[in-house]
Amino acid sequence: MDIKENVESVMAKVSAACEWAGRDLQDVSVMAVTKYVSAERVEQAVAAGIKHFGESRSDGLLEKKQTIQTPAHWHFVGRLQSRKVKEVVHECDIIHSLDRTSLAKEINKRYQGETPIACMVQVNVSGEETKAGIAPEELENFVRSLASYEHIQVKGLMTMAPHAENPEDVRPYFRHLRELRDYIQRLKLHHAPCHHLSMGMSNDFEQAVEEGATIIRLGTSLVGNETEREG
Ligand SMILES: *Cc1c(COP(=O)(O)O)cnc(C)c1O
């Protein structure tokens, strides 16, 4: 697996998607999701110019962060158990999976910092029962309720699209998330500037960028998956 080649290929596709959509390439951050790979792969991704890293487990986050010497941005992207909050809350720049009041409460209680911690509210746009996230019709109330947690800043929305053979099939979910983001932005809530859209993974990131993603989360297509055989 040549990560440098992967990065080049991904960047070419992101660049084409930006051009298609009339967007600025600077407005899209590429995150490497490293949950399936060793710290060595993370080092290679750093060397290839990747600056954003995502982990879905607290021990993975702490372990990878320790081994990487170069400064980077760390993101927590997985389902976050309340009892793990204290381990990650000072170790990442953005939590992408704020999906319930009890979690907001715990983050607010554990976080100590001058400025609030950046969070994305996870939205279940597809309505699949197995997916985490706030239902679209409950989003406004949920975001408004977060005003009472002084340490939380809602930087944007995040979603996991359903798996589809044809990535064009998930485009409507990305579009829906963008519309929800625009709606929340228009409320001009002090605690929720909500300009980010964290959406798009290995299979569907081009569609996500075309629909306005500002952070794409790539595992397999960028750093691979060492828990499976790679061909
Ligand atoms: C694993 C994971 C990804 C990356 O998945 P790939 O399909 O391998 O790109 C992105 N987002 C979240 C929340 C994940 O858990």
Image: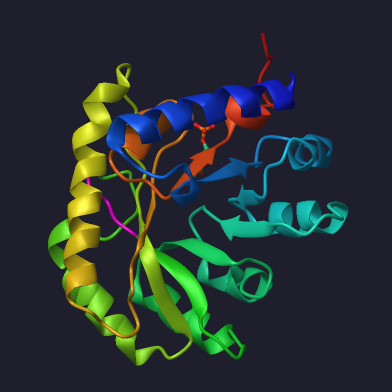
For the question of whether residue 135 can be seen, the reply is no
Residue 195 on image: x %, y %:
35, 64
Residue 43 on image: x %, y %:
82, 41
The image quarter containing residue 212 is top left
The answer to whether residue 62 is above or below residue 17 is below
Does the magenta segment cover residue 162? no
* Residue lying furthest left: 137
* Residue lying furthest top: 231
The image quarter containing residue 182 is bottom left
Query: Residue placed at 38% from the left, 73% from the top?
Result: 154
Q: With 69 as the anchor, is 178 left or right in this view?
A: left
The magenta segment: 122-127
Query: Residue placed at 64% from the left, 29% from the top?
Result: 7
- The one nearer the camera, 113 or 194, is 194
Residue 69 on image: x %, y %:
87, 55
The answer to whether residue 13 is above or below residue 148 is above
The image quarter containing residue 210 is top left
Quadrant (top left/top right/bottom left/bottom right) for the C terminus: top right
Query: Residue placed at 24% from the left, 51% from the top?
Result: 178
Q: With 52 as the anchor, is 169 left or right in this view?
A: left
Residue 4 on image: x %, y %:
72, 26
Quadrant (top left/top right/bottom left/bottom right) for the N terminus: top right
